Amino acid sequence: MELSQLETFLAVVAEKSFSRAAARLHRTQPAVSQVIRKLEEELGEPLFERASRDGTLTAAGEVLREYAERLLRLRNEASSALAEVKALERGKLTLAANEYTCLYLLPVLDAFREHCPQISILVQRSLASRIPDEVLGRTVEMGIVSYRPEDDQLGAIGVYSDDLVFIVPPEHALAREKNVRIRDLGAENFIAHNVPSPMRRRVEEAFASHKTPLNIGVELPSLEAIKRFVAGGNGVAFVPELTVQAEAMRGDVVIVDVPELAYARQLWLIYRRHGTPSYAAMAFRRVVRSLAREMGAPFLYDEKSGSASKKQMPETVR
């Protein structure tokens, strides 16, 4: 049974005549009669009373009319829904991020909501190490990570350049300094994340190269906890600048430059290279590109550096 057959059937029902239905459908009467005959053969039931000239339906015809109307109505609703999706009047965008990279998303999502207010958004918090698999497994459509995945099935766009910064409580003696040397930090009590990462290894190697002890007195499970603990006067820390901008502006912590530890890293928007993106995903990428153009550094939109041949060590497992 095909929808075109049901359209012909309903035209005969509405016109109460094979000839008038044929004229309405711009077809010949024999063609219409053939469609109805084939439909009756498929169903094994007559649909019209043959003795009647006004298209009276049989009991089977009455049942089919109800379902035919529902099916065609659903077809029309589906067509309208798909048109709305294309016009970004409905749809859903799913993204994955971790505690750190989610902060990049906030201004982007704000801009995206202005352009596509009818699109619902789900940001799923995940471990950075799992986000590429979630994108490939279609659990989410795109992800934001702080490393370039090496999987050739994933495309990556550089979207943000972030620095590692040294933060201290506002009452700390170093808060009055514009910059400090690593050798001046040997007596400090450092607060660190309890999950090892390349960023932490970079700091450890820098301290070792300067023959300076790195005293980690407290390890905490989140960047938010680290910032609050530092703000409370319990120590100092190295954190991504993106994560501490608000606290620095409020004066909860002070950023002090450490020239010997200039460590910039890039955030990446990853997606399935061979997948068909949704209209919402394509609109999101346009917003990311526009935001980079309008805001400038540290926002960016760099597709070239995301080539599969570019090798980078995973930035974090958080």
Image (spheres, rainbow, N blue to C red):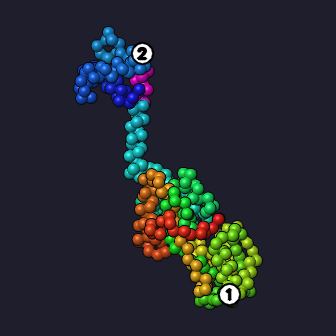
Indicate the position of residue 128 as horizontal and vertical percent values.
Answer: 61, 63
Q: Give the mark nearer the N terminus: 2 vs 1.
A: 2
**Near-viewer residue (258 or 247):** 258
Instruction: Give the residue drawn at x 75%, y 74%.
Output: 218
Camera sees residue 104: no
Q: Which of the two residues, 118 or 282, is positioned nearer the viewer here?
A: 282
In front of the other: 169 or 271: 271
Looking at the image, residue 192 lies above or below residue 170 = above
Residue 185 in magenta stretch: no
Residue 270 horizontal side relative to residue 13, left or right: right
Q: Residue lying furthest top in this view?
A: 51
- Magenta part mainly helix, strand or loop? helix
Task: Find the magenta span and give its range.
Answer: 60-70
**Label 2 sits on residue:** 45
Q: Is residue 76 above or below residue 314?
A: above
The percent position of residue 132, horizontal first and vertical second, equals 57, 59
